[in-house]
Image (spheres, rainbow, N blue to C red):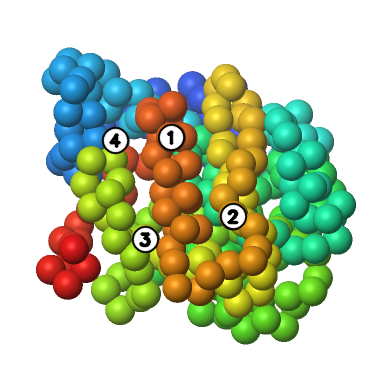
Amino acid sequence: MFYRLLSRLPLPLLYALAWPGYLLLYYVAGYRKAVVRQNLAQAFPDKSETERRALEKKFYLQLVQVALEILKTRTMSAEDIRQRVTVVNPQLLREYSNDFRDPVIVLSIHQGNWEWMLHGVRLQLDIPVDPVYKPLHNRTVDELMFAIRSQFGSRPITMAAAPRDILRRRREFRLFVLVADQAPIETERSHWLPFMNRDAAFYEGGQSIATITGCPVLFARCRRRARGYYEVEFAEVAKPPYDGNDHRITERYVQLAEQAIRGEPESWLWSNRRWKRQRPAKAR
């Protein structure tokens, strides 16, 4: 399989391949270029057209590099991940988990290398990490991503299975991780908030899970320190007791997500059709 062949190549060679991959994706295929340009224009109206084009090109190059890094995971060792991902402030996680005894909900975004971020936290701290994911339509790619997410001991859980799993194991220590910056579909419970200069719908999953379980909530930011090297930093979102009638967890998450994106805009997933839905009149 082509994916397996790529994963066997050394990272320096994969990074060399990233450049022609970027040229094909950006100049030939033009992958979602209209979406990326619209998103950047909306998010950074004060930047000039030249500045946005430069940011756009940086995004596409990093997108290819990160995709190849994720494929490479299949042939990486635990020590490889430990060398490439550091955790800046593990003491905050220790504090919120009662010295790694109580479960914690971790919310994050598609920035840096979000797959390596999960492995880095799991291996650096030697703690259980359960990432929640949406199955992909392509079965082959979905199986590949499941294998990548679970290869260092993490336990991926589908969104459909997550509520029951959370309630059944709510007293076990683990990090329950949701990368929650993608747009929910219309039938999913969501909350509308301003995000990067435009209203956007957000999953209420983190809010609901925290309210039901009483778990504290942290935000995980993945920064790119250099090509192939990342650092993860935690920030407080909320801790119990919670009011089931407010949206403070979602609101704080969105605030932290926007801060992270503005701090390192080239490494967020601008090709996502994040603002494809219009805010309904009743939600305004």
Name which residue lies at 53% across and 49% down. 108
Q: Residues within 10 Å of mark 1 (few under 14, many from 20)?
A: some
Q: Residues within 10 Å of mark 3 (few under 14, many from 20)?
A: many
Name which residue lies at 12% across and 68% down. 281
| CA distance for labels 4 and 3 | 29 Å
Q: Secondary structure at mark 2?
A: strand
Instruction: Name the residue tied to disc 2.
Output: 238
Q: Secondary structure at mark 3?
A: strand
Amino acid type, residue under disc 2 in the picture: Ala
Marks 3 and 4: in contact by CB < 8 Å?
no
Which numbered disc flags the more N-terminal residue, 3 or 1?
A: 3
Marks 3 and 2: in contact by CB < 8 Å?
no
Q: Residues within 10 Å of mark 4 (few under 14, many from 20)?
A: some
Instruction: Name the residue tied to disc 3.
Output: 202
Between circles 2 and 3, the one closer to the viewer is 2
Q: Nearer the viewer, residue 227 or 45?
A: 45
Instruction: Name the residue tied to disc 4.
Output: 25
Instruction: Name the residue tied to disc 1.
Output: 259
Marks 4 and 2: in contact by CB < 8 Å?
no
Between circles 1 and 4, the one closer to the viewer is 1
Amino acid type, residue under disc 3 in the picture: Phe
Name which residue lies at 18% across and 37% down. 42
